[in-house]
Image (tube, rainbow, N blue to C red):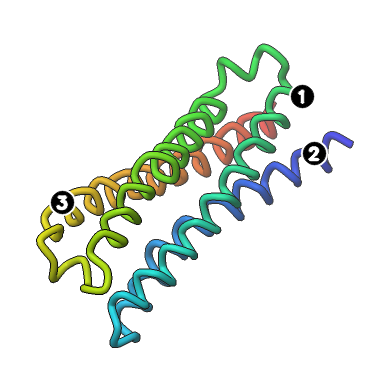
Amino acid sequence: MARLVEAVQAIAITFWVGSLWSTGLLVAPRLFSTLDDRTVAGTVAGRVFEATAVAGLICGVGILAILLFRQRRGAFRQTAFWLVVAMLAFTLVGQLGLQPVIAELREQAYPQEVMRSALSGSFAAWHAAAEVIYLVQCLLGAALVISVRTAGAGAART
């Protein structure tokens, strides 16, 4: 049973971090380089980022539950636990704090493209903040993968 729980945790981490990286580093840039209409590219990218965030919330809560199940109070002393908490917090800030503002700016600019409107400076600033938060999530995800891998290697040696 312990191996199954460990495998589920590994799959959840892989899916979450992999989706963060593939969405941010592959899908979104490809949309903007392929589609002529930047508004359509932004709308599709936004939907993909939203799906990635929902998947991340599900995976993150699942990972925390597994860590708490396996280690009880000892989970609070684990780097992986706090990395997941931080990733979840940044996901919530991005989805509940920044994305609604970005969407509102797009809506206010409609039918004009937001970057060609008087709101372009505001939009660029909020979008840059969202990008920084997403980058931090990706880096935390890398740290999570390394942390779990290192902890697993240490456990295998003992």
Q: Quick one: label 1 or label 2, which is nearer the N terminus?
A: 2
Image quadrant occupied by the C terminus: top right
Using the image, tell me which numbered label, if any, was put on residue 145.
none
Q: To which residue does mark 1 refer?
A: 69
- Image point (30%, 83%), residue name: 37
* Label 1–label 2 contact, CB within 8 A: yes
Q: Secondary structure at mark 2?
A: helix
- Which is more toward the observer, 156 or 151? 151
Residue 18 in view here: no
Q: Nearer the viewer, residue 81 or 124?
A: 124
Residue of label 2: 5
Proximity of marks 2 and 3: CB atoms separated by less than 8 Å: no
Left or right: 73 in relation to 44: right
CA distance separating discs 1 and 2: 9 Å
Q: Residue 67's x, y, as percent?
A: 68, 28
Q: Residue at x 46, y 38 (%)?
A: 92
Q: Quadrant of residue 156?
A: top right
